[in-house]
Amino acid sequence: MNYKETLRYLLERLPMYQRVGKAAYKADLSNTYALCGLLGNPEQKIRTIHIAGTNGKGSVAHILASVLQTAGMKVGLHTSPHYIDFRERIRINGNRIPKADVVRFVEENKKGIEQIQPSFFEMAVVMAFSYFAEQKVDIAVVETGMGGRLDSTNVLTPLISIITNIGLDHTQFLGNTLETIAREKAGIIKPGTPVVIGEKQQETSEVFAQVALESRSAVHYADSRITIPETDLLGSYQNKNIATALKSIEVLQGLGFDIGNASIAAGLKNVVQNTEFVGRWQLLGSNPMVICDAGHNIEGTQQVQQELNAIGYRQLHYVLGFVNDKNIDPVLEMLPQKAHYYYCKANIPRGMEVNELATKAHEKGLIGNTYPSVQAAFQSAKENAGKDDVVFVGGSTFVVAEVL
């Protein structure tokens, strides 16, 4: 098989949560352990940083990867989901895993994949570990999927664990309270391993303190009062993520890592260039200003609205789509009523039908029109927008992916 055929084989054979939702979710680590075992346990051959959290974990992962590679290290980076190409999930010093290596991995392990029948995510995680071990990375920065305790990445024994924050997302899998979700995310804390917490939240601090005490792990909270260095990341909400990354670097320095101030400064200035970071408060055009952001839960939407409120514009044109397994009512209630909406459905089975979205939005007082595709909605928004207007694309990672 060539690369295209290999991806088609994987997508047809392995359930992918981003596409089909709950049917792809497996609440234990047995498949991941089985796959890792077939490959000689590559996860035990690499040094790692493990990151969980409701929002910001992808940003923190990219920031850390940029700083560490600027400091002269060979850095693996695992993130999910991908926007355009599967290989975005597995990178070393900003370079995607070669297509030939994806094909080779599947060909060499096809029998095991068909026997174990992992999800797409489980397969991708183990492919990342295998590639990083083969390439002898100095360290790998690994982002969890949705959870922590039962996330496929949680077969790792990392040097440090990071939990960015806790919000009410994926509640059908992780629980309905911040405390319950925090306990699931805290599942990445390993015995004797320091943990960095990005935000001190009243509802979750006690959970983290208790789990850390049981694990004999030192807890470090990010300092929100620090001066944020210059960065190429747009969006003021990134300040929290930078603070989390800086505290994590401080902990790594305490473990003996040689990461100087010059590397930190240069790494922060070049996150986008070094790591191919996309999809978060990304500027796609000017006159009119065109912005996309993949924030899709309550906290992410709050951040987006704060950024939009800080921009002076005449009219806001909002290209909007969601997945069909989320309660979107609280998110819709947060959106500006004076905007004009362009409702659409991402081209995935899990996308919310556009007429259902339009009905729900209309009930919340949001005025707009429906479109047969993301691109049709996007083109209409750009055509209708004047040079002093703003076009924003969001609601779902998969909507954003189709305009990148």
Image (cartoon, rainbow, N blue to C red):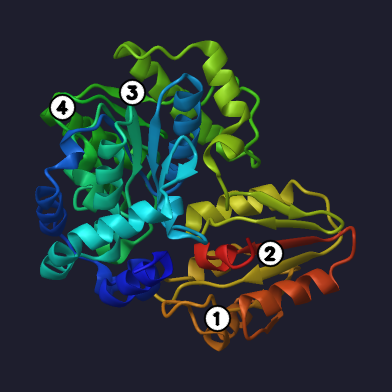
Question: Spatial distance from mark 4 to mark 2, Cα to Cα?
Answer: 44 Å
Q: Is residue 189 above or below residue 153?
A: above
Q: CA distance from mark 4 to mark 3?
A: 13 Å
The answer to whether the residue labelled 4 contacts the one labelled 3, judged by CB atoms less than 8 Å apart, is no
Secondary element at image label 1: helix
- First along the sequence among labels 2 and 1: 2
Real-space CA distance between mark 2 and mark 3, rounded to the nearest whole angstrom: 37 Å
Residue under pointer 2: 336
Question: For numbered disc 4, what is the local secondary structure?
Answer: helix
Q: Residue 328 in the image: state x and y as whole percent.
A: 48, 70
Residue tagged by mark 1?
A: 357
| 4 or 1: tag closer to the N-terminus | 4
Along the polypeptide, which appears first: circle 3 or circle 1? 3
Of callouts 4 and 2, the N-terminal one? 4
Where does the image place residue 397, in percent across and percent down from the top left? 51, 62
Q: Give how far apart the Cα atoms at labels 3 and 1 are.
A: 41 Å
Q: Image quarter for residue 26?
A: bottom left
For badge 4, the amino acid type reads Leu
Q: Nearer the viewer, residue 242 or 86?
A: 86
